Amino acid sequence: MRYHEWVPLDEIVRKAKMPEKDVLYRLNRLSKFEFVVRSTYGYAVSMGGYDALAINALVKKGILKAIGNKLGVGKEGDVYNVLLNDDRVAVLKFHKHGRTCFTRGKRYRDYLADKHHISWLYVSRLSAEREFNILNELYPLVKVPEPIAWNRHAIIMGKVEGEELKRIDLSEFLSREEIEELFWKIIEEVKKAYKIGYIHGDLSEFNIIYNGEDFVIIDWPQAVPTYHPEARFYLKRDIENVVRYFKKYKVEKDVDELFKYITEVKD
Ligand SMILES: Nc1ncnc2c1ncn2[C@@H]1O[C@H](COP(=O)(O)OP(=O)(O)OP(=O)(O)O)[C@@H](O)[C@H]1O
Ligand SMILES: [Mg+2]
Ligand SMILES: [Mg+2]
């Protein structure tokens, strides 16, 4: 089934190789769970339905055992605590792009007319695949979550204990020198990622998780390769965000010098 189309009933019947009344019975049930949505043109998978397909696949592959509570309270992101088959605790992140199409209560007819919906399913899946691939390239050389599995718009990765830098006051438990040390450690990770070929592109205190001793940089789907035409822009912005955050703690650094330091080739 292609993602961006309403699929007419007769096509579903043909693909399912089942009598129409059986197909309708199943579609009705799926519709009650809001796993599919219906229009005059046919049926489409809903975001919830796509979630269920991904969960089902990850369970069938023998990776996922149980889903727990949602992480990052109050955020839009759909990130859950999960338990893996090997009893390890991990994190499941659903990529959701363009979900406004559904939540804004647009009529499906508008939704259909709007070519830009070209498929939030497809875009979300691409984004998850991207993040998974990038994590694979960076882990374990750079401090990023361990990539564990990917299916559709979902990825499973290692759970990082700690809090986003945004939500902690470093000065409560670190000296000015220790804070500066942390700053340089973060810059080192940015440099390592750059050397491997990536710029985070959304680096800030929201995407660095710190546990009092060590930190991990999360949220990589938008990362750009260093050969990207706007690479300099993104790298500069990432550095500026980090510099701005640490300025609060009187760690004052020059963005241009850091830029030079990160991009210099030296072995
Ligand atoms: N591997 C992880 N371990 C622990 N917590 C995580 C992990 N990945 C994500 N989180 C939590 O979930 C939140 C959202 O994750 P992430 O930043 O990757 O997604 P996002 O939807 O792109 O968020 P944003 O809107 O900030 O860009 C994080 O801020 C963090 O609190
Ligand atoms: Mg984030
Ligand atoms: Mg993000």
Image: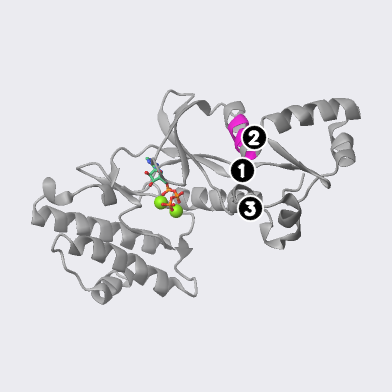
Q: Which element is circle 1 on?
A: loop
What segment carries the magenta color? 50-56
> Marks 1 and 2, how far apart in space?
8 Å
How crowded pointer 1 is (Cα within 10 Å; few <14, some 14-19, many 20+) is rated as many
Disc on the earlier residue, 2 or 3: 2
Is 54 included in the stretch rendered in magenta?
yes
Q: Which element is circle 3 on?
A: helix
Q: Judge from the rendering whether residue 181 lies leftward or rightward of residue 133; answer left or right.
A: left
Q: Nearer the viewer, mark 3 or mark 1?
A: 3
Which dot marks residue 152?
1
Disc on the earlier residue, 1 or 2: 2
The secondary structure that dominates the magenta segment is helix
Disc 2 target residue: 53
Q: Judge from the rendering whether residue 27 lies leftward or rightward of residue 54; answer left or right.
A: right
> Marks 2 and 3, how far apart in space?
20 Å
Q: How many marks?
A: 3
Residue occupying image coordinates x 46% and y 47%: 76
Quadrant the C terminus occupies: bottom left
Residue 219 vertical position relative to residue 27 in the rendered view, above or below: below
Q: Are marks 1 and 2 in contact (CB under 8 Å)?
A: yes
Disc 3 target residue: 101
Disc on the earlier residue, 3 or 1: 3
